[in-house]
Image (cartoon, rainbow, N blue to C red):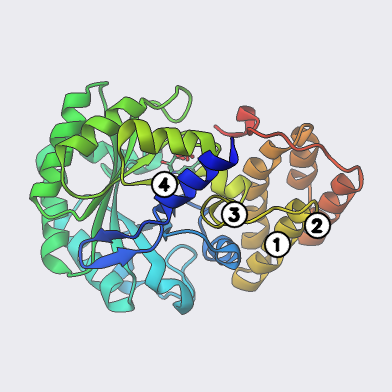
Amino acid sequence: MTRIMKTELADILNQPLAIGSRTIQKRLVMAPMAFLGNVAFRELVEQFGGYGLLFSEMCSAKRIPQENRYRSTYFRWRDAELSRLVCQIFGADPDRMALAARRVEAEGFLGVDINFGCSDITICRQNCGAAILNTPVLAAKIVSQVRKAISIPVFVKYRTGWQDQPRWAVEMARRFEDVGADALTFHPRVAPDRRSRPPKWEYIGRVKQAVSIPVFGNGNVFDQTDCLKMLLTTGCDGVAIGRMAIARPWLFAEWTMGYQSKDDLYLDCALRLADLLETHFNASQALRRFKRFGYYYSASFKFGHTLYRAIQSAENMIGAKHALQLFFERRPETVARPNLNFFS
Ligand SMILES: Cc1cc2nc3c(=O)[nH]c(=O)nc-3n(C[C@H](O)[C@H](O)[C@H](O)COP(=O)(O)O)c2cc1C
């Protein structure tokens, strides 16, 4: 990508964006990711900066009202991040979702994000996540009840639906706006398709044109060229980055602030995450999260499977760190675009 294109991208991403009663300073945000977008990983991203918003892992609306933030593995945050942190909630009962949203507001989060995008079988079996898109009236009722319960911004993250019908996705966007959503994150894939086929970015453009609230485009943005293309071809107001943020936590700083990555950054970053995970979680929770991170992180290397296997077989964090050191002693070659075998 040329320097001029990088500047053009940074100029767009650095324009403030009003979302309901709040304004964010950058239009590049980290998408919600269960298990991966945990409090430790978010602290790592914050050390680099450059993002407009972070989203929490999805949290069950049923549990939020009683949840102890110091014991919960998901509903956990640092106070310092609250002014840029949106809590994602999932559930099927409008009253429970509203109650959970009230707690989220009382804790001081910037906003509440309603999860209508997760197509994981365990979530869909509970009629939550993307399953709710099968009942548009219920989906709208949930957004409406949450809207009435709180004054902070309400975000909705959703997919094309269960059939490949862009008109339906547009219709849903209008419904969400009508009942009070302040912003949408739209991932243009049908629900049964986890992440195997490419998302249809042209649908993002259709959704954007149908509503006057901000729309974040999402799906398969792997580098700055992709990001600029998504912004220019769809007209979306911002971009939500998922897996690439795990592979390169400094990506936000690089794309919006021209942060230059150094040779030892990959190793340094992984070691820092290991330490942060040990600070925020007990030993087995920390190791499990580090192993999951290792999957996406390994996608950046030519022989990433070697690193991936070494991290997966580590018995404790000391072993995982040792595996990293050994891998980097061989000065591994990085790849510009991630190895998609690791990106399922
Ligand atoms: C491991 C993993 C966990 C995810 N968890 C959530 C989630 O809890 N809530 C949600 O709305 N989306 C979730 N997603 C979907 C992402 O937010 C995003 O829509 C998807 O990865 C496509 O964006 P990308 O191509 O930039 O990764 C998850 C994705 C991954 C890879």
Q: Earlier in the sequence, mark 1 or mark 4?
A: 4
- Where is residue 314? Give x, y as percent: 79, 50
Q: Quadrant of residue 235?
A: top left
Image vertical order of residue 327 relative to residue 75, above or below: above
Q: Residues within 10 Å of mark 3 (few under 14, many from 20)?
A: some
**Separation (CA) of disc 3 from disc 1:** 26 Å
Q: Which residue is mark 4?
A: 240
Q: Which residue is mark 2?
A: 321
Identify the residue at image location x=74%, y=40%. Answer: 308
Q: Earlier in the sequence, mark 3 or mark 4?
A: 4
Ligand 1 picture quarter: top left
**Separation (CA) of disc 1 from disc 2:** 8 Å
**Separation (CA) of disc 3 from disc 4:** 18 Å
Is 276 positioned to the left or the right of 224 in the image? right
- Where is residue 264? Give x, y as percent: 80, 54
Image vertical order of residue 124 relative to residue 192, above or below: below
Q: Nearer the viewer, mark 2 or mark 4?
A: 4
Q: Which residue is mark 1?
A: 274
- Verify CB contact (< 8 Å) between mark 3 and mark 4: no
Identify the residue at image location x=32%, y=73%. Answer: 66
**Ligand 1 under 8 Å from disc 4 Cβ:** yes
Q: Which residue is mark 3?
A: 258
Q: Earlier in the sequence, mark 2 or mark 3?
A: 3
